[in-house]
Image (cartoon, rainbow, N blue to C red):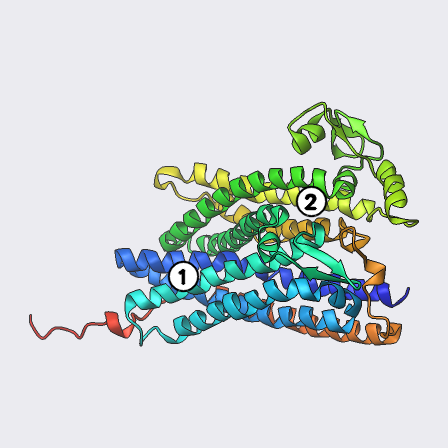
Amino acid sequence: MDALDLARWQFGVTTVYHFLFVPLTIGLGIFVAGLQTAWHRTGKEQYLTLTKFFGKLFLINFAMGVVTGIVQEFQFGMNWSEYSVFVGDVFGAPLAMEALLAFFMESTFLGLWIFGWDRLPKRAHLACIWAAAVGSNVSAYFILAANAWMKHPVGYEVVDGRARMTDLWAVLTNPTALAQVPHVIGAAFIVAGGFVLAVCGYWMLRTRRTGDGGMWRGAARAALVMTALAGVLVAATGDTSAKLMYEQQPMKLASAEGLERDTAAAPFSLVPGVEIPAVLSFLATNDPGATVQGTEDLQRRFERQFGPGDYRPDQTIVFWSFRVMIVFGLSTVGLSVLGLWLTRRRRPFPAWLSRALLLSLPLPLVAVTAGWLLSEIGRQPWTVAGELLTASSVSPGVSLAEVATSLTLFTLLYGALAVAETVLLTRHVRKGAAERAPLPAAERREPSLMY
């Protein structure tokens, strides 16, 4: 094992850990804003109670996401200096826009929302949480646009061994980004919906005998709707992504399907040895008879184009991560659709359904993690497709011992943060939201002296 291997492990571990918080922040912010909007429009106190309850969970997760995200940027300079030199002129614009525009907007209005309960007018305070939630989604757009450029570089030219951006608009409207952004954001709403469903399922079970679960039933129904709609968005954008993958990343597509040779009417593999004829060709091109390139034939073509080397990603990880992503994601969406059907017309949640909702917490998290592995490992051996190999991206002056030391420290630190996050979230969930939430000062009325 050399410094490159450990550097890849370190970036993979820290990124997977960070990405556990990102989708929950994106989706939960919108959900909390929706709850506060419902309180603003109806005046029902249960919406205020839920807003404050899930708002605190949102803030805990947001803080952890910020802490873990900072590490990502440090690693570019620590372990991946050659990569940073090559992409710096291109990444500078979208990352600066993310920090100065989106994150500034998100953090500023979130601060106003936190401290403005007793100080801001009701409408202004509501606008703050919406601005913060929108800011988190805009932030995701700029980050994903930069990531999409690594898979399908556009709007640039290479000068003196460095990529120089020639068209910012082309970078921001990269077709890969336009498909990837709604796909990831849709997945984020599924993660957030699953989180809310798990919390509501827990409290519906606890309040089942007392009959005090009406508030949780309403929140669960809203989360079921959000998750089901997000599932439609993820499916539609996933189809678009598959077609773009056929054109732009054929090696990833072939690896995800375990297809070794160029094949007309290519089948879709459910598991090794179980295939559905012509489905892969149809998904990739809308033509069931189309030819899909295979990994071994692509390897020979890439050797002629780029020189000797192995241009195949880890076949096992890419193949199975694709299936885990689909199965776990569909399971969450399927559970939400089933829940909507069983609880239609104000029907109560069956006890078994409330227990099943607890599974909606781990299922989407596993799905988005598998999706990230498919996306990033499937791009290998490139950091920038067709331009820069991963082996050429690592910092030349960093030793194996130095990477091992930082990896060990980050692992211990992240382990401690995981414990802290779990304790904080669990403690707040168990405390519940049954207590009467105090109204903001602007909404309070002194008791009347008239009898």
Q: In this picture, is 136 found above or below 112?
A: above
Mark 2: few/some/many CA within 10 Å (<14, 14-19, 20+): some
The residue where tag 2 is placed is: 324
Q: In this picture, is 331 found above or below 383?
A: above
Tell me the SS state at disc 2.
Answer: helix
Disc on res. 130: 1
Where residue 177 appears, x then y in whole percent?
Answer: 61, 50
Q: Residue at x 40, y 73 (%)?
A: 112
Most distant residue in the right direction: 308
Where residue 162 appears, x then y in whole percent?
Answer: 76, 63
Most distant residue in the left direction: 451
Please tell me how many numbered marks the rendered image carries. 2
Q: Quadrant of residue 246?
A: top right
Q: In this picture, is 348 found above or below 161?
A: above
Q: Is residue 75 left or right of residue 104?
A: right
Query: Residue 354 or 28: which is nearer the viewer?
Result: 28
Give the quadrant of the N terminus: bottom right
Disc on res. 55: none
Tell me the SS state at disc 1.
Answer: helix
Q: Residue at x 64, y 49 (%)?
A: 367
Query: Residue 127 or 176: which is nearer the viewer?
Result: 176
